[in-house]
């Protein structure tokens, strides 16, 4: 009888101990889950911050690039405007100076307002108005600058004429009208310094080609060995 009671007692104590272990195991498990949840939440917060910082950095680069591009465009625009102003001022100075010679008589070999020939007229005008040193004779002036097609002529371009093979006359384009008429100022043997047109039956057939010695940036172009830039 005592032995049986002892067996029952041992069994009861074992059962109680087993339940206690199970209880401890079940109770302690949620604490592990809670810790893991906190760690996951912290990692997610860090990832969010990293992503936010990355986006801020990318946006900063994009913004800086946009500002740089805008500044470059504005600089280019300002440069073009400045060049256009410089070009127009130079050409206006040339034509204004040329017009002060209107009525001056032609004189072969002449270089003054008392009498002047075609190449000396061009040389004097470009020298006084634009600081350029052109050759003395028309044939040599024809070697300067860049060639320009007749349909692309602009004010201030030089146009050359000949009665035969050799260039013998030079003039300055004074105006290109809306209908394409080219008017030029020159020192002619018959009228002295005057304005004529390429539509003229005398000058039209004698036209050979045109040169531009000042480009649209207001700078000297072509053979700079013979052209002095003194702007």
Image (tube, helix red, strand yellow):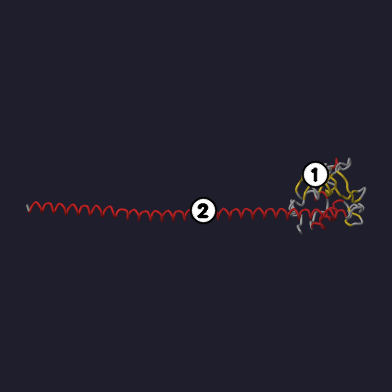
Nearest to the observer: residue 111 or residue 124: 124
Q: Quadrant of residue 27?
A: bottom left
Nearest to the observer: residue 151 or residue 53: 53
Q: How far is the residue under mark 2 from the one under mark 1?
A: 62 Å
Foreground label between 2 and 1: 2
Q: Secondary structure at mark 2?
A: helix
Q: Residues within 10 Å of mark 2 (few under 14, many from 20)?
A: few
Q: Position of residue 54 (x, y in %)?
A: 50, 54
**Residue at image location 6% in from the left, 52% down from the top:** 1
Q: Are marks 2 and 1 in contact (CB under 8 Å)?
A: no
**Residue at image location 42% in from the left, 53% down from the top:** 44
Q: Which residue is mark 1?
A: 209
Would residue 137 be found to the left or right of residue 1 on screen?
Answer: right
Q: Position of residue 15 (x, y in %)?
A: 18, 52
Nearest to the observer: residue 14 or residue 158: 14
Would residue 229 be found to the left or right of residue 74 on screen?
Answer: right
Q: Position of residue 64 (x, y in %)?
A: 58, 55
Q: Which residue is mark 2?
A: 55
Of the two numbered discs 2 and 1 on the same chain, state the one appearing first in sequence: 2
Q: Secondary structure at mark 1?
A: strand
Q: Position of residue 35 (x, y in %)?
A: 35, 56
């Amino acid at each position: 009888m005592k032995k049986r009671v002892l067996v029952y007692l041992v069994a009861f104590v074992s059962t109680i101990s087993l339940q206690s272990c199970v209880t401890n195991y079940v109770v302690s498990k949620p604490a592990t889950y809670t810790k893991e949840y906190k760690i996951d939440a912290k990692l997610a917060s860090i990832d969010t911050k990293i992503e936010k910082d990355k986006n801020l950095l990318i946006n900063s680069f994009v913004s800086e690039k946009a500002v740089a591009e805008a500044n470059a465009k504005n600089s280019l625009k300002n440069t073009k405007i400045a060049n256009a102003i410089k070009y127009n001022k130079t050409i206006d100075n040339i034509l204004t100076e040329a017009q002060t010679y209107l009525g001056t008589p032609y004189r072969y070999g002449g270089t003054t307002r008392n009498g002047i020939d075609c190449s000396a007229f061009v040389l004097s005008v470009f020298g006084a108005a634009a600081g350029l040193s052109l050759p003395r004779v028309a044939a040599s002036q024809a070697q300067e600058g860049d060639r320009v097609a007749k349909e692309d002529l602009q004010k201030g371009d030089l146009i050359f004429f000949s009665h035969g093979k050799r260039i013998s006359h030079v003039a300055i384009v004074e105006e290109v009208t809306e209908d394409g008429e080219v008017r030029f100022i020159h020192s002619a043997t018959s009228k002295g310094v005057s304005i004529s047109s390429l539509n003229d039956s005398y000058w039209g057939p004698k036209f050979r080609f045109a040169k531009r010695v000042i480009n649209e940036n207001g700078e000297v172009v072509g053979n700079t060995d013979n052209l002095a830039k003194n702007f």
